[in-house]
Amino acid sequence: MGDPGSLVTEGGAGERSWCLRRVGMNAEWLLLEDGNEVTVGRGFGVTYQLVSKICPLMISRNHCILKQNAEGQWTIMDNKSLNGVWLNRERLEPLKVYSIHKGDHIQLGVPLENKENAEYEYEVTEEDWERIYPCLSPKSDQMMEKNKGLRTKRKYNLDELEGSGAEGPSNLKSKISKLSCELGQPVKSHGKGEVASPPPEYLDTKLTSFESSGKTTGAHVNPGPAKVIELHRKKKKASNPSASQSNLELFKITMSRILMLKTQMQEKQVAVLNVKKQTKKGSSKKIVKMERELQDLQSQLCAEQAQQQARVEQLEKTIQEEQQHLQGLEKEEGEEDLKQQLAQALQEYRTLMEELNRSKKNFEAIIQAKDKELEQTKEEKEKVQAQKEEVLSHMNDVLENELQCIICSEYFVEAVTLNCAHSFCSYCINEWMKRKVECPICRKDIKSKTRSLVLDNCISKMVDNLNSEVKERRVVLIRERKVKLIYREAWRAAIHRVARSWTQLSD
């Protein structure tokens, strides 16, 4: 077992570390960190969580504790586990500290039926960190992200406050930028990607709509944009060259001719179809003539479309040049008005920013007070939750220790209480009585067996609240025992029939 003494480390700090190496496996090793307490169990809140797939109740919720004493020596303590902790093949007394040394064998729980070794067996060792790291078992991390929702809510409220407060200057800036885009920036055509300006009618409608919106908004819009609009109108009237007008007139004429050619083509196509229906197969001269006329109309239409495309491109270039000319005039003559408007907008923006800063400080003070209240509430909730979990853990440990059959280490299946008041599974005690007719616990003679329906109902309700793996394992166990009983009864009946047949033959 080992007497208390100093634990000698062979390597320097950071080079070699102590760990519990799992026997027969290069994984699920348990690291023993200097200065930290290591807890092992199947419950939550432990350093390493061990959940047995074969027998989930083999490891208790807080099975054992490993920590260093004042001299730096590692020790192990059985925390009142159900199936015990074994050091060098000897079981430890609960709540008693034992020192461990390099090469010691540690066993958690007992071997199952028909197995020589327990599921969790470890060897105390000291290895290089590069050798230990790939084989370490992950720790059960229960850290939660705090104040994440609170920070998100705070950010959302601050953004909403700033957005609602900055209404005047932002609206003014957006309207000024919108006006500059409508009056000065070029627009891409959908044809070949060339830059083209909107027609003069489009500019007129935009300017009138903006002017009407400026009248309706009232005090929110400065009188500056109205001057820009009037200036733009004067420049547009003064700088309308004859080239753009002639191009527009040609564009209209060409469009009307294209429409006329399309209607003629449609009429010709209808006429050709009618003639084809009326005439016989032999007389096709008229059809050939009409088809030629239709081809001529198609060629004319293609030529007109090509000319139209060229005129559209020319018109786009002309409009672009006019727009660039207007932009130059606006930059020269409207610069002073824009500077005044921008200065006024900046003044309003500064005023609003000062108000926002004051509101922000007040809002932050309110948030800090709310944060303190939330932290106090969280601390109280965590205390209550910890007390509740402690009570539930204690109750579950009591239930697991008291409602298990000592023979099969499972929850009672068809619980039977003996005359000595000890309870077992009906199947298990029947198998036991084939060897000894005495209680497995107190060794008293078995004189009577009583079925305990209360224990069966209690266990059924408790199993319903457990995970699906435990439920399935219990169902499989009950099914296997029923099958064994059926086979046994059939075997006994067969033997009885054979005995009766022999007696009849002998008679």
Image (cartoon, helix red, strand yellow):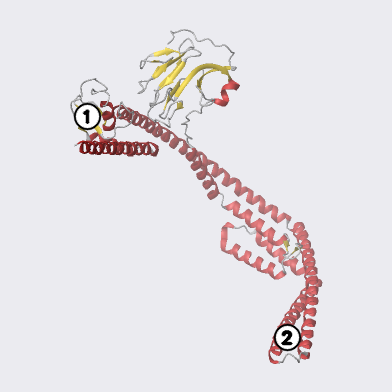
Coordinates of residue 158 in the picture (x, y in percent): 52, 43
Task: Give the labeled residue for mark 2.
Answer: 268
51 up-or-down from 10: above or below: below
Most foreground residue, 96 or 284: 284
Front position among marks 1 and 2: 1
Coordinates of residue 318 in the picture (x, y in percent): 79, 67
302 up-or-down from 160: above or below: below
Quadrant containing the N terminus is top left
Q: Residues within 10 Å of mark 2 (few under 14, many from 20)?
A: some
Coordinates of residue 314 in the picture (x, y in percent): 80, 69
Coordinates of residue 303 in the picture (x, y in percent): 81, 76
Q: Amino acid at mark 1?
A: Thr
Task: Give the labeled residue for mark 1.
Answer: 417
Q: Amino acid at mark 2?
A: Lys
Query: Which disc is residue 93 wearing?
Result: none
Inter-mark Cα distance, 1 to 2:
108 Å
Total of numbered circles in the picture? Answer: 2
Most foreground residue, 355 or 101: 101
Side (left or right) of 385 relative to 125: left
Displayed quadrant of residue 281? bottom right
Most foreground residue, 293 or 203: 293
Q: Earlier in the sequence, mark 1 or mark 2?
A: 2
